[in-house]
């Protein structure tokens, strides 16, 4: 199978690694890719913007793709999957209308209300709202205030705070950027990310994972795209995945079919596990980053066949997925200044093309090495028979890597290892 992957980060590097080890894969291309994945796939930095549908169709034709896998949300929300399907390609990734589940929080709330899915109460304000309207919104919600950018913000558009002034400042910044701002009630309970393969009404869950979104240890600092993750989640109730599928993902998939916009691709449910069970924090229309790096490290079923089954509408015929026993942990090494203003161009010591890290914001440097070229620079990924072992191995790998001014969290998966994650309503 000739495959084109669209995207350039560590999530796409994880997808490329999984696809490259599937014997069904005969050729692997990436648009735009990055220098760190060029030993596994042919990268096409010249292809044009990933949300330029005509450019992506042209590349898919040029490389004679039999399957196109779209990683990031921006091309999906822009309708690149629609253009590729119209041109006759099998595509892993939802059509534009269904990708609104991530592209518009108002759309997602409407779908959830119709599907009877538990989520936070919310209200939005459009750009141009007055200071009085904003104050009324802040009076109605919080503390704790949950203020979201109702546009694509790469996971960084959410501020959760006890500080009314900080909530107000973020809301003003969102409105000034021309996006609507959404205020929500705060959902209690630990967060879990469950990725589901969805093909119409067929829903197949992957392993549950937990992301660490704040920049610094102890869940302090600004929200980021994600600083590390682990899978599976030992603290989730035994029937946790089954309940999320039954109470959240299947009803949403059915509702999208009923609206005439069936979902095909990866539905990412970000949930808080509260006293009544799972409640939706957000949906994304694609694999999560960095959870994918941990989840795919445990997938034993060859990946190309899995994604192809979804793309061709045969997911219900796919045999059950096989998973390696144990746990996986991924930790992100971020550049100095991330997330506010990451510094680029610094040499990364201890990483060559053979080092088994996943590259995100890197570029080829002198002498076969790499330099930083983005905020989240790279991920280490480790597996182990226990979560503690996987964690230790991930940090051992990071000990051998040095990026001047770079930073990473030292507590990824630690609360789960120490057993300090508690579920509301359970003693
Ligand atoms: N892990 C957060 C995201 O992928 O949006």
Image (spheres, helix red, strand yellow):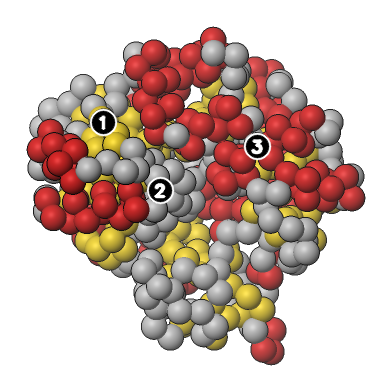
Image label count? 3
Above or below, 195 against 229 in this view is above
Which residue occupies 25% across, 63% down?
A: 221
Is residue 298 visible to us here? Answer: no
For the residue pair 237 and 127, the one nearer the viewer reads as: 127
What kind of element bears circle 3? loop
For the residue pair 220 and 195, the one nearer the viewer reads as: 220
Q: Which residue is mark 1?
A: 123
Q: How far from the left and from the top, in percent, is residue 126?
A: 33, 38
Choose mark 3 or mark 2, whichever is in front.
Answer: 2
Q: Which residue is mark 2?
A: 178
Q: Identify the mark nearer the N-term, 1 or 2.
A: 1
Q: How far from the left and from the top, in percent, is residue 327?
A: 44, 48
Report the side of 422 relative to 337 (left or right). Answer: left
Residue 79 is tagged as: 3
How packed is label 3: few (under 14 Cα within 10 Å), some, or many (20 or more)? many
Q: Identify the mark nearer the N-term, 1 or 3.
A: 3
Pointer 2 residue Cβ closer than 8 Å to ligand 1: no
Above or below, 304 against 327 in this view is above
Which residue occupies 54% across, 13% down?
A: 259
Q: Identify the mark nearer the N-term, 3 or 2.
A: 3
Residue 204, picture quadrant: top right
Which residue occupies 51% across, 79% down?
A: 344
Above or below, 225 against 302 in this view is below
What kind of element bears circle 1? strand
Pointer 1 residue Cβ closer than 8 Å to ligand 1: no
Which residue reaches farthest top?
258
Q: How far from the left and from the top, in percent, is residue 108?
A: 42, 27
């Amino acid at each position: 199978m000739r495959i084109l992957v669209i995207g350039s980060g560590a999530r796409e590097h994880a997808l490329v690694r999984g696809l490259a080890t599937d014997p069904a894969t005969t050729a692997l291309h990436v648009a735009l890719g990055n220098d760190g994945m060029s030993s596994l796939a042919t990268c096409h930095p010249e292809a044009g913007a990933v949300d330029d549908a005509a450019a992506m169709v042209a590349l898919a034709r040029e490389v004679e793709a039999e399957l196109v896998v779209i990683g990031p949300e921006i091309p999906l929300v822009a309708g690149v999957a629609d253009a590729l399907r119209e041109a006759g390609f099998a595509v892993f990734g939802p059509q534009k209308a269904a990708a609104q589940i991530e592209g518009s929080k108002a759309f997602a709330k409407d779908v959830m209300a119709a599907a009877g899915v538990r989520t936070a109460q919310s209200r939005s304000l459009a750009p141009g709202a007055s200071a009085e309207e904003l104050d009324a919104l802040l009076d109605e919600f919080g503390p704790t205030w949950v203020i979201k950018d109702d546009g694509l913000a790469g996971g960084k558009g959410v501020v959760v705070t006890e500080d009314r002034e900080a909530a107000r400042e973020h809301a003003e910044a969102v409105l000034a950027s021309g996006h609507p701002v959404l205020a929500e009630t705060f959902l209690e309970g630990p967060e879990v990310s469950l990725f589901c393969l969805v093909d119409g009404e067929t829903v197949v869950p992957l392993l549950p994972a937990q992301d660490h979104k704040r920049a610094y240890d102890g869940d302090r600092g600004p929200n980021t795209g994600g600083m590390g993750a682990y899978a599976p989640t030992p603290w989730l109730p035994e029937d946790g995945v089954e309940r999320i599928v039954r109470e959240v993902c299947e009803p949403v998939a059915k509702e999208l079919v009923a609206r005439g916009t069936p979902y095909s691709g990866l539905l990412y449910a970000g949930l808080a596990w509260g006293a009544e069970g799972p409640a939706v924090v957000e949906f994304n229309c694609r694999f999560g980053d960095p959870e994918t790096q941990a989840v795919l490290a445990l997938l034993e079923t060859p990946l190309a066949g899995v994604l192809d089954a979804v793309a061709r509408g045969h997911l219900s015929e796919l045999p059950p997925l096989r998973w390696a026993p144990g746990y996986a942990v991924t930790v992100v090494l971020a550049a100095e200044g991330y997330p506010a203003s990451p510094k680029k161009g610094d040499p990364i010591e201890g990483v060559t093309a053979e080092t088994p890290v996943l590259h995100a914001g890197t570029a080829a440097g002198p002498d076969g090495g790499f330099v930083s070229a983005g905020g989240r620079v790279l991920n280490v990924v480790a597996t182990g028979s226990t979560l503690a072992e996987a964690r230790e191995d991930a940090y051992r790998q990071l000990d051998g890597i040095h990026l001047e001014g770079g930073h990473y969290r030292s507590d990824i998966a630690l609360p789960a290892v120490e057993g300090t994650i508690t579920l509301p309503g359970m003693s």
